[in-house]
Image (cartoon, rainbow, N blue to C red):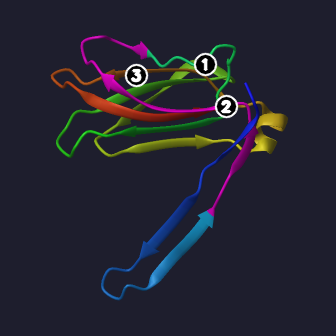
């Protein structure tokens, strides 16, 4: 795989409703000089049980990850199970409709700490159907 750079452009903006005064305006762009980036969507089958999200061939650790539940308000949750390189017990994360989960290691984190994601699986809530998980994986 050719080298590529993965960049998350993030802007956090907080304004006061009655005056429109800006209380927080913070922008930053964490960067990873990586090997790949993969963007996609997956239709979640709530009857399938935990479904692994496959990594590209030869990739064992993910350093950039973005997950979003694209279901409309009132839709079903998507439950992520994220396994970290430093802990074999998966972290359970519930994405309600519209929720976003982001993990974006920079070059120093990768080199110095070696913290990353070694596996991702997901399930949908029972009774739901057709929820879409949007994702980006990078290393």
CB of mark 2 within 8 Å of CB of mark 1?
yes
33 is within the stretch colored magenta: yes
Distance in Å between CA atoms under marks 2 and 3: 22 Å
| CA distance for labels 3 and 1 | 17 Å
Q: Residue furthest bottom?
A: 19
Residue 59 location in percent, x, y? 68, 19
* Side of 5 where 73 appears, left or right: left
Q: Nearer the viewer, residue 12 or 55?
A: 55
As measured in the structure, the alpha-carbon distance from the residue carrying label 2 to the one carrying label 1 is: 9 Å
Q: Earlier in the sequence, mark 3 or mark 1?
A: 1
> Which of marks 1 and 2 precedes in the sequence?
2
Q: Residue furthest right?
A: 112
Question: Around disc 2, counting alpha carbons within 10 Å, would you say few (fewer than 14), some (14 to 19), or many (20 or more)?
Answer: some
The residue singled out by tag 2 in the image is 36
Q: Is residue 113 left or right of residue 88?
A: right
Residue that lies at the very extreme toward the front in this rendered image: 2
Q: Say which of 135 and 121 sits in front.
A: 135
Single out the mark in the foreground, 2 or 3. Answer: 2
How busy is the neighbourhood of tag 1: few (under 14 within 10 Å), some, or many (20 plus)? few
Residue sitting at x 22%, y 33%: 76
SS category of the residue bearing label 3? strand
User: Percent x, y for residue 86?
Assistant: 69, 24
Q: Is residue 97 above or below residue 84?
A: below
Instruction: Please give the name of the residue rendered at 47% of the width and 81% of the height, measured from the top-left corner.
Output: 22
Look at 30% across and 11% down and name the residue there.
48
In the image: residue 7, left or right of residue 90: right
Q: Quadrant of the C terminus?
A: top right
Quadrant of image for the N terminus: top right
Which mark is drawn over residue 122? Answer: 3
- Give the image location of residue 25, x and y in percent: 54, 73
Which stretch did the figure color magenta?
A: 28-51
Q: For mark 1, what is the residue?
A: 56
């Amino acid at each position: 795989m050719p080298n590529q750079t993965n960049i998350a452009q993030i802007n956090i903006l907080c304004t006061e409703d009655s005056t429109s005064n800006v209380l927080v305006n913070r922008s930053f762009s964490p960067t990873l000089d990586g090997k790949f980036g993969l963007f996609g969507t997956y239709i979640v089958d709530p009857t399938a049980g935990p479904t692994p999200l496959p990594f590209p061939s030869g990739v064992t650790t993910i350093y950039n990850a973005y997950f979003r539940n694209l279901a409309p308000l009132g839709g079903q949750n998507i439950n992520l199970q994220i396994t970290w390189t430093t802990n074999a017990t998966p972290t359970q994360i519930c994405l309600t409709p519209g929720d976003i989960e982001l993990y974006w290691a920079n070059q120093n984190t990768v080199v110095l700490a070696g913290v990353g994601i070694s596996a991702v699986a997901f399930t949908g809530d029972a009774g739901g159907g057709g929820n879409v998980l949007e994702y980006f994986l990078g290393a």
